[in-house]
Amino acid sequence: MTGLQPAARIIFDADARRAFADLYPETAGPLRHNLAGHPLLTLDALAELGEALPPGQVEYNQSRLPVGIAPEDVPANGLGIGETIRTIAANQSWVVIKNIEAVPTYRALLIDLLDELAATVAPRTGPMLTPQGFVFISSPRSITPFHFDPEHNILLNIWGDKVMHVWPGGDERFAPAREHERYHAGGHRNLPWSDAFARQELAVPLGPGDAVHMPVMAPHYVEVDDAPALSLSITWRSAWSYREAEAHAANRWLRRFGLNPPMPPRWPSHARGRSWLWRILRRMGQG
């Protein structure tokens, strides 16, 4: 597939692909990209996209938040999605447009980007499953609270400056097993924050043309600098990421019987027994 950019344009050059190969799948770290100026990623284009999508595909709220906050305590901004995006420089808001792959032109852009990385991904974690894209638009000094996500992810910063603070995936010091289990049972992505976590992370500065690889379920938060910022997150799942999620869900079920199962192992290992247990439970209607 192709997006609106010229067919010969390479977004991840040879240096970026080598850097990605050094990181994938379990190490967070910086990359570079060449996506600046894409016509699908202007404020007007994204405002029109946000207005056209169902409400469940857009999330937006006030943006000057503490690093750790419960989802129910995040305040609304009192605006519509289109106005929020068009006036993002002044309205102290944060926006995510979810699942942009539902729109053919955006799906084409997403697939083009993922195709450039497939030669590294496939030999390690298998085919790229469930490709999804998310656009983040942030007012100056915005905070995206401490949370984790289940996908393999690269965040491409398009304009503005921000810092990604990321902790190791699967480390119970920062995201205990029960938080993983809560999330994989349908809970919110936000995590409890402790000031003791500070200065134990990798801090990755992101300006225009910068990107960062984010491992599956790596806890992180984002802070935006003194100007608005826009980023595109390109994500995919793997058979391994799904098995890890299934094992966490099975652990939650096992705790109901007084058991204390260990955290599932990280890549390349699998908690195969617990993964199959969860699949059986779902077929029986108990998952």
Image (cartoon, rainbow, N blue to C red):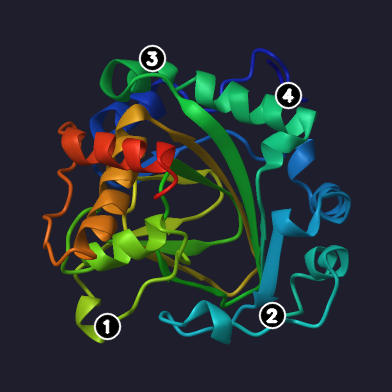
Nearest to N terminus: mark 1 or mark 2: 2
Cα distance, mark 1 to mark 2? 25 Å
**Above or below for 116 versus 160:** above
Is residue 3 toward the left or the right of residue 287 in the image? right
Is residue 145 toward the left or the right of residue 9 in the image? left
Q: Which mark is residue 3?
A: 4
| Amino acid at dot 3 | Ala
Residue topped by disc 2: 92
Percent position (x, y) of residue 166?
Answer: 32, 60
Residue in the image at 33% along x and 46% along y: 245
| Amino acid at dot 4 | Gly
Residue in the image at 43% along x and 19% along y: 118
Secondary structure beneath dot 4 equals loop
Nearest to N terminus: mark 3 or mark 2: 2
Cα distance, mark 4 to mark 2? 31 Å
Nearest to N terminus: mark 3 or mark 1: 3
Residue topped by disc 3: 119
| Amino acid at dot 1 | Ser
Q: Which mark is residue 194?
A: 1
Quadrant housing residue 256: bottom left
Quarter of the picture containing the N terminus is: top right
Is residue 66 toward the left or the right of residue 136 in the image? left
Decide if residue 270 is in sight here.
no
Cα distance, mark 1 to mark 4? 42 Å
